[in-house]
Amino acid sequence: LNLLEELVADCCTDTGYCFSGLFKVVPEEMPYNTVEEMVSLRPVGLDSCLPFTFTSRSKMTFDNFTVGAGTALTVLSIEHNTGQEDQVRCHVQGQQEASAEVHIPLSSHGQFIECESVERFTLREIMSSPCLRSRNLVLVNLISSCASTTFSHIISLILCTVRKNILKFPSSLEVDVVDVTELCKDVNFVTPLSLTEVLSKPEESFPAVVEILEGPETRSLFKCSWLPQISQNSHLVFHKVGTSAMVLLSSLKGRKTQQYFLVSQQYGGRFRRRPREFNSVYELYVASVQAPGLKFSVTRNCDEVEEEGLPALSVGEQLEIVRCERMELPCGSSTGQKQSVEALLCQQEVKQEDEREEIFLPLYMQGHFVEVLTDNKKYKLRDLGKEFNLPLDVKVVSRDTELETDPLSGFACLRIEGAMLEPTIQASFPNKPDHCFEIPTQWLSMSVSFTRDPLPWPSGEPPKWHVDRVTEVTDTFFYEYRKQGNSDAAPPPRPPKRNLTSSKSCKKASKSSKKSSKGDKSKHRPDKSTPTKELANLTLNTKKRPPAPPPPVSIT
């Protein structure tokens, strides 16, 4: 029964195909011994199968009414009388249009044979009725021979329909195997294939016209123009299969919604590097791991916080990262011991003395920095992956001329988030066979079948293909891609806990030293009443940015 239910579900629900043939019940050759036995074994519910007709091989007499052998009796209803035996109310058609009704007790014995019924049953009705599944059936409106078929034949008919899963017969199932090759010469058997199975087909199978049996299971990953046109029963031309090197690009966050693009490395545009922006020293550290000797410039003033080891930085100062090491904080911990934290050792240019002085920047320090670039060269997308590590900020300076519209050319800055090797199918629609696109098979799931339809171009004269190299994807795609990366990286460090007594003493010491230095300076210059630059550059934006992601894998 479980197998039959599976067949019904797969045949009539999952695939969208339903066997349209109708069946009728073949009367049993073996007679029933009682009327009750015949009524109880009706193929469908008793109420829905009335009226039905049967005959008796012997003469019967009921209440002075005699029914001859072979007379057709049509059951109209079942009579239930309190305190009496249940009876069937039957209609008897006599000669010269004479008719009568007779009541026959259910316990009546004899040899009763049911007559052929005009009722027709669908495949779903047969599957849902245990009685019908135990009867011989005739396929009345599909095969001209109207040959009798048992349930094993129905299983064969179901297997001819579209199935996306493998049908497994339990070893305990008793079925008859019949060779129907001669009867099915004109039948085209459909073989559903997943996109992964399409990839394994030989090169000789392409190009070919395929039919979509099941559309994409999800449409939340792509925002491209071709995806809405792919639906059940539509057709595509599969030109070839292969593996494409791709990169994932993202636009920078701004007033507009952030966008993401999956771009083939065959993209024909040219890029220039753009300086990256960093919102913390930890982000600088992550970038320096990928690119040692990173140079950066301060874009917003940073106030000194001596007890946390935060130095004062001014706008325009340029620094170069030397290495990461531990530094001691000037104030001790709550236990009175000196605290050490991880920090970037940087070299700072001193313009007045043409020298470099060393400065420590704790990794937990927040700030606003920008990368210093001297490179103004134009790069192809695949060359960027060979020469630099990711992520990388770039700008399109010359569009891909093979694309009708290049969606990347309008962005002031794009970030190359990562690279991947994607199994793809180059496809097109039959009405535009020269306009191709690449289907990433690992990110899109659907079922297709190869057809014998002719290719939509003259034999031996394939069109010149124009392949879309840019596919817009959603933020869901981006997050799913990030999940596949390294998510076990340690979070950025936190500032050390302050010791109130030591921090107060440090503040007093720093204040006294500042006062003495100010007093010395005031002897040599007059007082000024104008606001200082530090006051002019104060900001209310003290919100901490989220930590930078771990260093991704470079393009190979």
Image: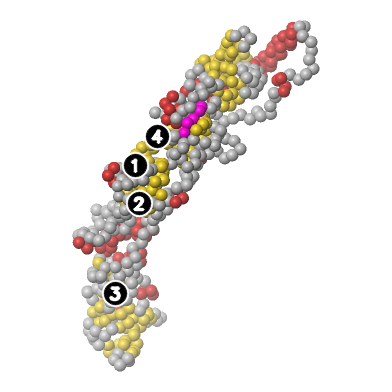
Q: Position of residue 177 (x, y in %)?
A: 21, 59
Q: Nearer the viewer, mark 4 or mark 2?
A: 2
Residue 71 image position (x, y, % from top left): 26, 85
Residues under labels 4 and 3: Cα distance? 72 Å
**Residue that badge 2 annotates:** 456
Q: Which mark is residue 245?
A: 4
Which label was assigned to residue 37? 3
Magenta part of the chain: 269-273
Q: Residue at x 26, y 72 (%)?
A: 26
Q: Secondary structure at mark 2?
A: loop
What distance separates the C-alpha of mark 3 from that of mark 2? 63 Å
In the picture of the structure, the residue carrying the numbered disc 1 is 241
Measure the C-alpha gap from mark 2 to mark 1: 19 Å
Label 4 SS: strand
Is 266 magenta? The answer is no
User: On the rendered image, what quadrant is the C terminus found in?
Assistant: top left
How many neighbours does mark 1 have within 10 angstroms: few (below 14), some (14-19), or many (20 or more)?
many
**Label 4 neighbour load within 10 Å: few <14, some 14-19, many 20+:** some
Residue at horizontal 51 percent and vertical 24 percent from the top? 376
